[in-house]
Image: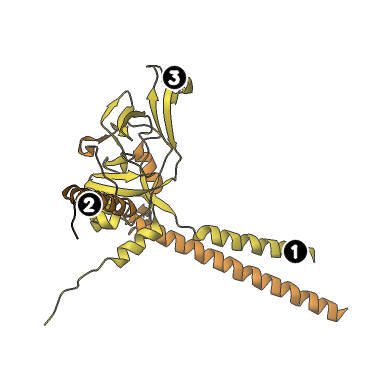
Chain colours: A yellow, B orange
């Protein structure tokens, strides 16, 4: 009887694992994918994007808002006037495709509340007007913010992307 | 019916404002957001070679498919579509799980049969 209980529990675990595995994996939305499939702005607007890393935007109260500890840049909360935190895997939508290298996305509604992701050769990583000492300056909601989240890039669910690729109309041509 | 000139002007003004309001509401409802910033000047962070650079992240997130070459050595396949590779990986996981469930069901059945046989024997 005890063996049967163990097996039943194992079966339940497998079923749970099955459901977990059914949730689609995310991959980086790369310039290669963009070039291969040539998605238009309209198509991209129907895709759910996600951020790969936490994004922190902040306004300095003084020049000492950030410091380096153990090789990592740390934001000192006491020297920050205003901060916006976007956790990793937060969904976002495309607002505008400036060109094939720059995608403007929005994590929340509101005037000017958009972040650009720029082709860095491998992925679409966060873009800024200027980069000084690994800190980017970008405009968000009509205010200039600093960011240290230079590693954040756009991600997409594989299943959704595959669905969109399949739904693309392909003309096979005409034969006599 | 006689209308005063100022009343007519008021009517035109109200109508004009109503049309503008309707336009703004339609724009807001359609979810269209205006991009006011000149993002064409935005650039990615300068590339630095480190353990946490975007390169290493993209490598982690791009599955590598291995194949056997003429010498039966496993080598990474060139120009693999990451989407297709990820779907293949998902399909394989799903197959293993289904096989696992079937295997467990067979074990349960076998255990029941063994118990039944043992009971009969006793």
Q: CA distance from mark 2 to mark 1?
A: 80 Å
Tell me which chain the residue with mark 1 is part of: A
Residue located at (31% from left, 67% from top)? A167
Secondary structure found at label 3? helix
Secondary structure found at label 1? helix
Quadrant location, the C terminus of chain A: bottom left
Give whichever of A142, B49 is nearer the camera. Answer: A142
* Location of residue B121 by image quarter: bottom right
- What is the x, y in percent for residue A135? 34, 27
Q: Is residue B104 above or below residue B81?
A: below
- What is the x, y in percent for residue B67? 37, 58
Residue located at (28% from left, 53% from top)? B22
Q: Tell whether B81 sits left or right of A79.
A: left
Count of numbered marks: 3
Q: CA distance from mark 1 to mark 3?
A: 58 Å
Q: Nearer the viewer, mark 3 or mark 2?
A: 2
- The reply to whether callout 1 and callout 3 are in contact (CB within 8 Å) is no
Give whichever of B37, B41 is nearer the camera. Answer: B37
Query: Would residue A26 be seen by someone viewing this image from the given angle?
Result: yes
Say the numbered circle drawn on residue B11. Answer: 2
Q: On the image, numbered disc 1 is attached to which residue? A: A5
Crowding near the residue tagged with mark 1, few <14, some 14–19, many ≥20 C-alpha atoms within 10 Å: few
Q: CA distance from mark 3 to mark 2?
A: 55 Å
- What is the x, y in percent for residue A48? 37, 53
Q: Farthest residue in the front direction?
A: B1
- What is the x, y in percent for residue B107? 68, 70
Q: On the image, numbered disc 3 is attached to which residue? A: A79
Say the numbered circle drawn on residue B26. Answer: none
């Amino acid at each position: 009887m005890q063996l049967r209980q163990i097996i039943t529990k194992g079966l339940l675990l497998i079923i749970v694992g099955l459901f977990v595995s059914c949730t689609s994996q995310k991959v980086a939305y790369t310039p290669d994918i963009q070039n291969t499939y040539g998605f238009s702005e309209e198509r991209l607007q129907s895709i759910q994007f996600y951020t790969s890393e936490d994004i922190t935007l902040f306004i300095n109260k003084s020049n000492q808002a950030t410091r380096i500890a153990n090789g990592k840049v740390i934001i000192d909360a006491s020297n920050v006037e205003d901060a916006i935190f976007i956790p990793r895997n937060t969904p976002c939508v495309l607002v505008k495709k400036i060109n094939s290298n720059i995608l403007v996305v929005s994590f929340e509604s509101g005037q000017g509340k958009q972040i650009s992701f720029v082709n860095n050769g491998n992925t679409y990583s966060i873009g800024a007007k200027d980069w000084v000492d690994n800190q980017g300056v970008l405009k968000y909601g009509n205010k200039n913010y600093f960011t240290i989240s230079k590693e954040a890039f756009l991600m997409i669910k594989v299943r959704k992307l595959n669905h969109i690729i399949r739904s693309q109309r392909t003309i096979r041509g005409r034969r006599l | 019916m006689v209308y005063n000139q100022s009343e007519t002007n008021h009517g035109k003004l109200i109508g004009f404002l109503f049309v503008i309001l309707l336009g703004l509401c339609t724009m807001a409802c359609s979810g269209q957001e205006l991009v006011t910033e000149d993002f064409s000047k935005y650039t990615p962070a300068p590339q630095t070679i480190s353990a946490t650079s975007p390169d290493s992240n993209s490598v982690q997130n791009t599955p590598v498919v291995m194949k056997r070459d003429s010498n039966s050595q496993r080598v990474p396949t060139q120009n693999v579509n990451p989407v297709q590779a990820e779907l293949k990986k998902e399909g394989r996981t799903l197959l293993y799980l289904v096989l696992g469930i079937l295997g467990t069901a067979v074990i349960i059945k076998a255990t029941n049969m063994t118990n039944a046989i043992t009971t009969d024997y006793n």
